[in-house]
Every structure is written in C-alpha cells, then in structure tokens.
Image (spheres, helix red, strand yellow):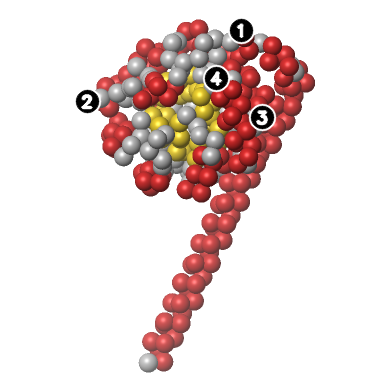
Amino acid sequence: MFMISKVISIMHRKSSNRKSISLIINIKANELMKDILSEIIANKRFEVDLQKQAISIEQLQEGISESPTLRSMKQALASSASGIIAEFKRRSPSKGWIQEEACPEEIVPSYAAAGASALSILTDEKFFGGSLKDIRATRPLVEIPILRKDFIIDEYQLYQAKIVGADAVLLIAAALELEKCNELAEKAHELGLEVLLEIHMEKELDYLAERPDMLGVNNRHLGTFHTDVENSFRIASLLPDDLLWVSESGISEPDTVRRLRDVGFRGFLVGETFMRQPTPGAALKTFIQSVER
C-alpha cells in the first residue's frame, strides 16, 4: 500500500510538473505572439509617420476625387460559386521569401482571368515585401474588387487605399483597440471602402459593434504564425448570420473550401498555395475547377 501511495504521489508530482511546464510554454508562446505583433505595429507607426512627413493627409484628401470607382467585394463573394480571394504576396514573416521577384502586373491579371472573385494585395513592405504601388499598377488591369491587406492603424492609410484604387481594407482586431477599430471602420465607410474585419478568437467578436461588411476568421495565429484551418470550423457557430464570412489562411485543398462553405463561409482567402507555383494563375484555375465540381 505504501508503494502504491508513493507511485501515485510521484505520478501526481509529474502531472503537476507537466501542467506547470505546459502553462509556462503557453505563457511564453503568448508573450512571443505579442512581441512579434508589437514589432509589426511599432514599425507600421514609424512607417506611417514617415509617409505623413512626405505627403500630408490634406494632400491625400485632395486626391480622393481622382480615385477609381469602387467595386463591392461583399457582393462579388456573395454571388460567386467559388468565393476565392486570390492573394498576391512576395514573402511571409514566418517563411521568408515566397517569390521575391513576383510581378503584380503579370500575376494579378492572371488571377482575374482564372476566375478569382476578388483579390488581396499585401502592401506591407518590411514583413511581406509589398507596396501600395502593387495596387496602383494592377488596378487598371482588372475589373474585380481589390482588398488592401496591411496592418491598418491610422486613417491616413485609408486615404492611401482609396487613392490607389483599393475597394476594401482589412482591419485586424488583434492589432487595434476596440474604439480605434470602430473609428477606422466608420472612416472607411465614409470613404466608400468596404471593411473586412479579421478576428482569430471568440473574445474578438466584441469588435462587431461598428458593423463590418465582411467578417474574416484568420486561421493563422498572428505573432507565432502557427496556422490551423480548423479554427474557422471551431468558431463558425458563434458568428452572426447577417455577415458574410471569410476564412483566411491555411487553405490549400479544394475540399477544405467545400467543407467551409457547408458551415456558412462564402469567402476563402488563399495566397501561398498559388504564389509558390511557377504560374499562380494556372494553379488558381485548377483549384477553382476542383472546388466547383
């Protein structure tokens, strides 16, 4: 009996140790996520401040009247059989360069020709290798909606998006305080831009006070950049039915799109799967054909 008690005691201590280690790992992972996201946001603030010194917000406001006619990304996704938002990006913070020399004037029109419902173009330079020039260069070449995908933290960036020809902007709950997110969503709507609000977890549903046009569920944990497409399935039952849902990141198989559509998603943001192929447009076409079978 003494031996059994001793074994149980040892097992209990080991279990407690494992729980302690697991807790420490989770805390460290959360700290890492916060640190990386904080680095991105800090850099973005510095970047926007420099841009304001070069071109004032008043100058941007003067250029609004010259911006192109907007196209509805929400309507495009709602009426599409595939709902694919094809993404143009050169690199990822977690995986480095995907296509360093990728040419938007070639790839973006090939996405449109292959049947993309909408386009996502990364404009963050330091972490994703993008630029506002990528939207400006491709806007005249395609007729489908373009999402400016970036870490939007200032209304200055909304004016930029409008001027270069974006139709929608991404607002990331994890990167913004609730009040600031609502302010930016309101301003985007004033400018005629649609809003894709991105969440990753249940608690971020509080950000829906200023109703976005579309609600995105990011399957990638910002900061750690761990991706799990099951995140969209886990959170689906909590999403409001009156919003158009978009699943973002980690989608590499047509069957995943079909499964996500079955639980209510109507938009599917896919980038790396296509960008890693020699001809991203051809890869998208084959993907869509498989989705619609």
Which one is in front, 220 or 180? 180
Secondary element type, mark 1: helix
Secondary element type, mark 2: loop
Residue at 42% x, 24% y is 74
Label 1 neighbour load within 10 Å: few <14, some 14-19, many 20+: few
**Amino acid type assigned to the residue bearing label 1 in the image:** Glu
Give the Cα separation between the discs numbered 1 and 2: 42 Å
Look at discs 1 and 4 and give the one toward the viewer.
Answer: 4
Report the quarter where the C terminus lies.
top left
When the figure is inspected, residue 144 is found, relative to residue 181, above or below; the finding is above
Look at discs 4 and 3 and give the one toward the viewer.
Answer: 4
x%, y% of residue 50? 74, 24
Tell which circle, 1 or 4, labels the residue nearer the N-terminal end.
1
- The answer to whether residue 124 of the structure is visible from this angle is no
Secondary element type, mark 3: loop
Look at discs 1 and 2 and give the one toward the viewer.
Answer: 1
x%, y% of residue 186? 59, 29
x%, y% of residue 184? 61, 31
Q: Which mark is residue 154?
A: 3
Q: Which mark is residue 192?
A: 4
When the figure is inspected, residue 119 is found, relative to residue 26, above or below; the finding is above
Q: Which mark is residue 66?
A: 1
Tell which circle, 4 or 3, labels the residue nearer the N-terminal end.
3
Look at discs 3 and 2 and give the one toward the viewer.
Answer: 3
Give the Cα separation between the discs numbered 1 and 4: 14 Å
Disc 4 and disc 3 in contact, CB within 8 angstroms? no
In the rendered structure, the answer to whether residue 93 lies left or right of residue 51 reads left
The residue labelled by disc 2 is 293
**Amino acid type assigned to the residue bearing label 2 in the image:** Arg
